[in-house]
Image (tube, helix red, strand yellow):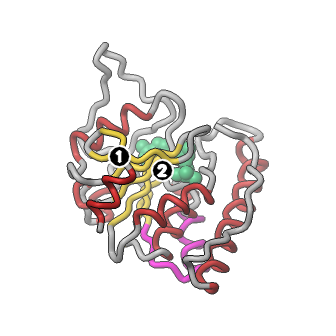
């Protein structure tokens, strides 16, 4: 996990109209400002699992996979920046976040950006889910437990076309297990990594960009 705001260029996307570009750039700016305050108010005193993904990198991936009304879910949506970004790009976007105070921040941010993104203050783990590796390890790292958020959203994991997660080290296998057990076989899982950007999986396998383009046309 990086602890500092990466130096990123502004949102320069010729394929987006100027108004949307400006909105996305303002959203990222505000997202970083909220995190900087959260970092000094909360993380400087105690551990908290929220560290933001590199918004610009995630934006590239969201642009690549967008299609009107494609259903998007962010696991652990924190301040909501990525879910709101997805909504502004035309996805039908939801986020699930365990920390209710972060969800409050996300809803206020969505309102400021005139976004219809929806958030559940709950867990992204489906009810009854139990994690165990092949060798019996049941540790879930920083992934916490709580009431499952799918009922609140009125949507099951299998209803989503694109799922995004930013796992801490060692937590990615659980995300693949969740998709294998509850996700749709043809859904995309976008996994943000610290050093390798966003990896795209379909059916548990790294998805080939060329094959993806042909399928999604
Ligand atoms: C590494 S942060 C990623 C934040 C955001 N997705 C991003 O990429 O900027 C992980 C987030 O997951 C949340 N979280 C941890 N366990 C969760 C669970 N079971 N259900 C929902 N959110 C959870 C944490 O509170 C934290 O905000």
Question: What residue appears at the point 29 percent right and 64 percent down from the top-left corner?
Answer: 216
N-terminal label among 1 and 2: 2
Q: Is residue 193 above or below residue 9?
A: above
Q: Secondary structure at mark 1?
A: loop
Residue 26: x and y, percent?
A: 69, 74
Q: Pick the quarter of the image with the C terminus.
A: bottom left
Task: Say which residue label 1 marks.
Answer: 207
Q: Nearer the viewer, mark 1 or mark 2?
A: 1
Q: Is mark 2 within 8 Å of ligand 1?
A: yes
Question: What residue appears at the point 34 percent right and 60 percent down from the top-left corner?
Answer: 213
Quadrant of the rendered structure where residue 154 is? Answer: bottom left
Residue 76 is tagged as 2
Magenta stretch holds residue 81: no
Q: Is mark 1 in CB contact (under 8 Å) with mark 2?
A: no
Q: Is residue 82 above or below residue 197?
A: below
Q: Pick the quarter of the image with the N terminus.
A: top right
35 horizontally vs 55: left or right: right
Magenta stretch holds residue 108: yes
CA separation, marks 1 and 2? 23 Å
Q: Nearer the viewer, residue 8 or 100?
A: 8
Q: Main secondary structure of the magenta part?
A: helix
Residue 98: x and y, percent?
A: 47, 50
Q: Nearer the viewer, residue 211 or 126?
A: 211
Crowd rating for badge 1 (residues with CA inside 10 Å; few <14, some 14–19, many 20+): some
Quadrant of the rendered structure where residue 79 is? Answer: bottom right
Question: What residue appears at the point 26 percent right and 60 percent down from the top-left corner?
Answer: 215
Q: Residue furthest top?
A: 135
2 horizontally vs 203: left or right: right
Q: Is residue 112 above or below residue 60?
A: below
The residue range painted magenta reads 103-118
Quadrant of the rendered structure where residue 4 is? Answer: top right
Residue 143: x and y, percent?
A: 46, 37
């Amino acid at each position: 996990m990086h602890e500092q705001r990466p130096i990123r260029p502004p949102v320069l996307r010729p394929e987006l109209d100027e108004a949307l570009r400006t909105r996305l750039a303002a959203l990222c700016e505000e997202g970083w400002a909220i995190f900087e305050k959260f970092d000094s108010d909360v993380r400087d005193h105690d551990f908290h699992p929220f560290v933001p993904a590199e918004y610009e990198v995630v934006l590239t991936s969201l642009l690549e996979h967008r299609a009107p009304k494609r259903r998007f879910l962010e696991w652990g949506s924190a301040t909501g920046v990525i879910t709101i970004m997805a909504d502004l790009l035309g996805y039908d976007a939801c986020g699930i976040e365990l920390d209710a105070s972060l969800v409050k921040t996300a809803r206020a941010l969505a309102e400021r950006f005139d976004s219809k993104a929806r958030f559940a203050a709950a867990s992204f783990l489906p009810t009854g889910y139990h994690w165990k590796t092949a060798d019996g390890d049941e540790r879930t790292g920083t992934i916490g437990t709580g009431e499952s958020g799918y009922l609140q959203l009125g949507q099951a994991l299998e209803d989503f076309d694109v799922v995004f997660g930013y796992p801490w080290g060692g937590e990615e296998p659980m995300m693949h297990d969740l998709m294998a057990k509850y996700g749709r076989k043809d859904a995309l899982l976008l996994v943000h990594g610290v050093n390798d950007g966003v990896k795209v999986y379909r059916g548990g396998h790294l998805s080939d960009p060329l094959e993806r383009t042909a399928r999604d046309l």
